Image (cartoon, rainbow, N blue to C red):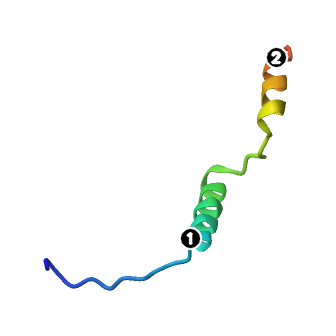
Amino acid sequence: VVGFAQCYLFDAQDIVTFGVTYLEKHFGATPIVPAHEAAQRSCEPSG
């Protein structure tokens, strides 16, 4: 044993929710686009 550390266990869904909330707060939210829609959009002309 190297040292004494206090540990906490979190539910997996709580960790995911925290991570998503943190990323959206700091980097903005991006709507989730289904793969088939993303492929269709990439073929559309831009401009």
Residue at image mark 2: 43
The residue under the point 63% across, 60% down is 20
Q: Compared with residue 42, is residue 17 higher up or lower down, i.e. above or below?
A: below
Q: Amino acid at mark 2?
A: Cys
Q: Compared with residue 45, is residue 37 higher up or lower down, i.e. above or below?
A: below
Quarter holding the C terminus? top right
Circle number at residue 32:
none
- Give the mark toward the camera: 2 or 1: 1
Q: Is the residue marked by circle 1 packed among few (<14), some (14-19), or many (20+) residues within 10 Å?
A: few
Residue at image mark 1: 12
Which of the two residues, 28 or 5, is positioned nearer the viewer here?
5
The residue under the point 60% across, 64% down is 16
Q: Compared with residue 21, is residue 47 higher up or lower down, i.e. above or below?
A: above
Q: Amino acid at mark 1?
A: Ala
Residue 28: x %, y % from top left: 68, 50
Mark 2–mark 1 Cα distance, whole angstroms, equals 37 Å
Viewed as shown, does residue 2 lie left or right of 40? left
